[in-house]
Amino acid sequence: MGPVVRLGRGLLGRWVRGARGGDRGSATVWVALTVATMCAVFAAVLGLGQVVAARHRAGGAADLAALAAADRALWGSPDACAKAAEVARAQGAELVRCSVAGEIADVRVRARFGPYGPTVRSRAGPARALPGLPAAVP
């Protein structure tokens, strides 16, 4: 008969007898924590994306509404603001405030996207009417 091999407490011994140590099932806990962390990071990135999209949508709607109001500025403030509200609605936003002073239109627009509703201000008018700019060359 050959020599008898004794299995010690090393790695081979655990593998043969089965892992009955104190860390049994710890991989499940680590995987669960990793998945929960990844879900939280994903939710934060989604929320940040919605905030950025809402701000860009409101900015675009405000710019277009201000241009529409400035285009109608010579027809009077009520007509210019009505056109700005129409353009803002067409962009999926709402006109919060509108004022026309001479040829300059100043509007505030709110665009809802998810739970967010940023308000953006925009001004439009001829370049020569803006303070600090040289007169436009015809």
Image (spheres, helix red, strand yellow):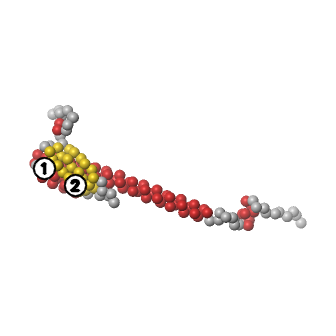
Q: In which quarter of the image is residue 118?
A: bottom left
From the top left corner, tell me how far across and down residue 113 is, in percent: 32, 58
**Residue 70, position as x, y percentages in the image:** 17, 46
At a point 17% along the width and 33% down the height, the residue shown is 135
Q: In this view, does 93 lie to the left or right of 41?
A: left
Residue 49 location (% of width, % of height): 38, 54
Q: Residue 51: tell me if it is visible.
A: yes
Q: Which of 107 and 72 is in front in this view?
A: 107
Judged from the image, the secondary structure of the residue bearing numbered disc 2 is: strand
Residue indicated by mark 1: 77
Q: In this view, does 129 lie above or below 112?
A: above
Query: Which residue reaches farthest right?
Result: 1
**Of the residues shown, which amino acid type is indicated by label 2?**
Val
Tell me where residue 66 appears, x and y as whole percent: 20, 48
Please name the residue shown 21% across and 35% down the image: 132
Picture quarter containing residue 44?
A: bottom left
* Amino acid on which the number 1 mark rests in the picture: Ser
Residue 56 relative to residue 15: left or right: left
Q: Does the image show residue 127?
A: no
Residue 17: image tag: none
Front residue of 84/138: it is: 84
- Specify few, some or many for label 2: CA neighbours under 10 Å numbering under 14, 14-19, or 20 or more: some
- Marks 1 and 2, Cα distance to the nearest angstrom? 15 Å
Element class at badge 1:
helix
Q: Residue at x 32, y 54 (%)?
A: 54
Please identify the quadrant where the N terminus is shown: bottom right
**Disc 2 target residue:** 96
